[in-house]
Image (tube, helix red, strand yellow):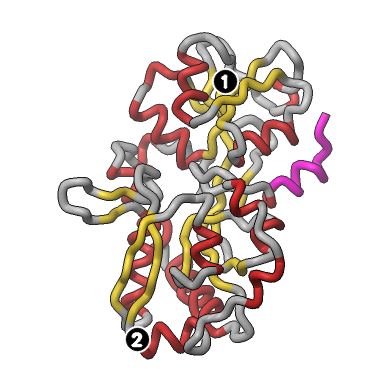
């Protein structure tokens, strides 16, 4: 049985809704902290060059989406990136990356900011994080007939839990459901398929992903939020440097847009891009 104190500590578990914890990011070491932009702080460089460098990850809707035909990027992380660039009076430069390489790209000074990262302790050794963009709730998609009300009900050997290896879902399951039978698969799609084919009783996904999964395939199962609700913060990562000016600016920009409801609008609009409407979002889910 997991105590309330253990549940409270779970918000530090790694994520980026669909984000997996890349082996490269976990292997980073503290000497990389010494890497600094050659031309002063990030804030000074962006203001002088009028360029804000960000990264996008193909196929990670609703976080990032790249139109293959036009090359145009969308998704709520890109909506945020464009608005931040406008606030800094800069143009946006976008490069492709992966969740596992995003922290390395920050360290190597290839990008200035990465949206959609979770502030894990291993990442915090080498980069810094902004205030939370949102809180992403852990959910389950269950087979027909299984409707648990608590996580404790699932923590037993006869419950088969599908996860994608190395992801935040994997880490979460091992921490919260140590007695359950873990069905660890290579990709999120394989984990979802395991429920459909009867290999697993449920799959764990953060809410931003489970909403999209069920919308694309209603037959996969039902979204349930077991109690107590467990959430993890999603932030933006920035380079660790002596000057806090850039991170402070981003924090202030975030607070301004959160207080006015703009961040929530960006999130819900990006979900609509993949067919998830506001009425599809359970009322207990608060981003």
Q: State whether residue 123 is above or below residue 8.
A: below
Question: Residue at 33% across / 52% down in the picture?
Answer: 75
Residue for point 55% across, 60% down: 103
- Say if mark 2 contacts mark 1, CB within 8 Å: no
* Tag 1 secondary structure: strand
N-terminal of the pair, mark 2 or mark 1, is 2
x, y percent for residue 242: 63, 84
State the quadrant of the N terminus. Answer: top right
Residue located 76% across and 48% down the image = 9
Which quadrant holds residue 124? bottom right
| Residue 178 position by quadrant | top right
Name the residue: 49% across, 55% down. 116
- The answer to if 4 sits in the magenta stretch is yes
Main SS, magenta residues:
helix
Residue placed most toward the observer, 181 or 221:
181
x and y percentages locating residue 114 in the rendered image = 47, 63
User: Which numbered marker is on residue 202?
Assistant: 1
**Residue 265: image x %, image y %?**
36, 56
| In the foreground, 9 or 51 | 51
Badge number at residue 49: 2
Q: Is residue 286 left or right of residue 6?
A: left
Please tell me whether residue 84 is drawn above or below residue 148 in the rendered image: below
Residue 284 is a magenta residue: no
Element on which disc 2 rests: helix
Q: Position of residue 120 (x, y in %)?
A: 66, 55
The boundaries of the magenta stretch are 1-10
Residue 275 is marked as none
Answer whether residue 268 is visible to the viewer in this image.
no
Q: Estimate how packed mark 1 is, as few (under 14), some (14 to 19) or many (20 or more) residues with alpha carbons within 10 Å.
A: many
Q: CA distance from mark 2 to mark 1?
A: 49 Å
Asked if residue 217 shows in the view, the reply is: yes
């Amino acid at each position: 049985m997991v105590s309330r104190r253990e549940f409270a500590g779970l918000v530090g578990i790694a994520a980026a809704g669909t984000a997996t914890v890349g082996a490269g990011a976990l292997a980073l070491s503290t000497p990389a902290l010494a890497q600094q932009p050659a031309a002063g702080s990030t804030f000074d460089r962006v203001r002088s060059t009028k360029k804000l460098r960000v990264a996008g990850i193909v196929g990670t809707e609703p976080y990032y989406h790249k139109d293959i035909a036009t090359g145009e990027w969308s998704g709520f992380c890109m909506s945020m990136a464009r608005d931040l660039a406008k606030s800094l009076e800069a143009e946006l430069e976008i490069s492709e990356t992966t969740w596992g390489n995003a922290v390395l790209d920050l360290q190597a000074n290839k990008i200035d900011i990465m949206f959609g990262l979770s502030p894990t302790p291993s990442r915090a050794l080498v980069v810094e994080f902004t205030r939370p963009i949102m809180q992403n709730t852990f959910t389950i998609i269950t087979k027909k007939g299984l409707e648990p009300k608590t996580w404790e009900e699932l923590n037993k050997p006869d419950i088969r839990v599908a996860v994608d290896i190395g992801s935040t879902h994997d880490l979460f399951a091992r921490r919260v459901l140590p007695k359950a039978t873990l069905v660890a698969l290579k990709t999120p799609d394989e984990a979802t398929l395991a429920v459909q084919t009867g290999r697993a009783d449920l799959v764990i996904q953060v809410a931003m992903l489970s909403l999209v999964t069920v919308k694309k395939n209603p037959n996969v199962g039902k979204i349930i939020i077991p109690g107590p609700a467990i959430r993890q913060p999603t932030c933006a990562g920035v380079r660790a440097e002596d000057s806090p000016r850039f991170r402070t600016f981003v924090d202030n920009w975030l607070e301004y847009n959160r207080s006015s409801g703009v961040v929530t609008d960006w999130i819900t609009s990006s979900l609509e891009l993949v067919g998830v409407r506001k009425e599809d979002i359970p009322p207990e889910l608060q981003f």
